Amino acid sequence: MYKFLKKIYLKIGYFYGFIDLEPKNITKKRVLYKIGKVNMHNTLVDELIPQAVTIGENFVSSSKSVILAHDASLYNHIRKHRVEEVVIGDNVFLGYGAIVLPGIKIGDGAIIGAGSVVTKDVLPNTIVAGNPARQISTVAEYIKKCEERGVLFDTPSSFEKYYENS
């Protein structure tokens, strides 16, 4: 199994340009997902194919959230993995326990609710939640609702160090 996974890892790394394959010589480049300036990042990013994940600036995520770029569900049937790039825009919030599946694009300013399973692309400045995740409002609508209910408070100054890039 290890040899098989290594083979897939090398092929995908080569495809995305993160690994150079020279005759009888393998030179690894920096094989990591791409991410901008981060505020708070607690997400588990796909460990098999991290190079297929791109995360924008000012990304904030809660613990137990996951971003996947591969799907091994077909391996027992056809001995192949599905691999699709995941792109997350700038100023995105990923809630506690949210899961982003392969091939998803999340637009700038989007908010992904806790426990959501993102199976479709998310438009910029929208809020999605649920399993599967569905749009529940825009960010502007949510801000207005919170203001009307009087539930918005100033963030403690001790948190500012996490948000200096915003």
Image: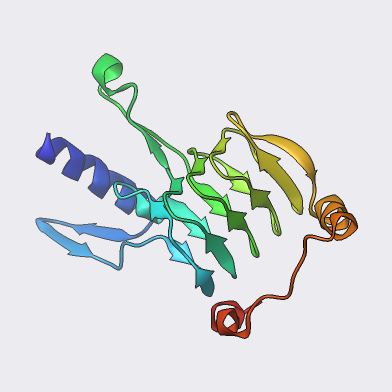
Q: Can you name the residue that lies furthest to the front here? A: 150
> Residue 12: x and y, percent?
33, 46
> Residue 57: x and y, percent?
59, 69
Up the image or down, 63 lies above or below 3; here it is: below
Residue 123 seen anywhere in this rendered image of the structure: no
Up the image or down, 36 lies above or below 93; here it is: below
Q: Quadrant of residue 69?
A: top left
Q: Residue at x 49, y 46 (%)?
A: 85
Up the image or down, 59 lies above or below 104; here it is: below
Q: Can you name the residue that lies furthest to the top here? A: 77
Determine whether, in the image, residue 66 is placed left or right of residue 118.
Answer: left
Q: Residue at x 17, y 45 (%)?
A: 6
Q: Quadrant of residue 19?
A: bottom left
> Residue 43: x and y, percent?
43, 55
- In the depicted view, which residue is nearer to us: 144 or 74? 144
- In the depicted view, which residue is nearer to us: 150 or 158? 150
Looking at the rendered image, the quarter that the C terminus falls into is bottom right
Q: Residue at x 42, y 43 (%)?
A: 68
Looking at the rendered image, the quarter that the N terminus falls into is top left
- In the depicted view, which residue is nearer to us: 154 or 13? 154
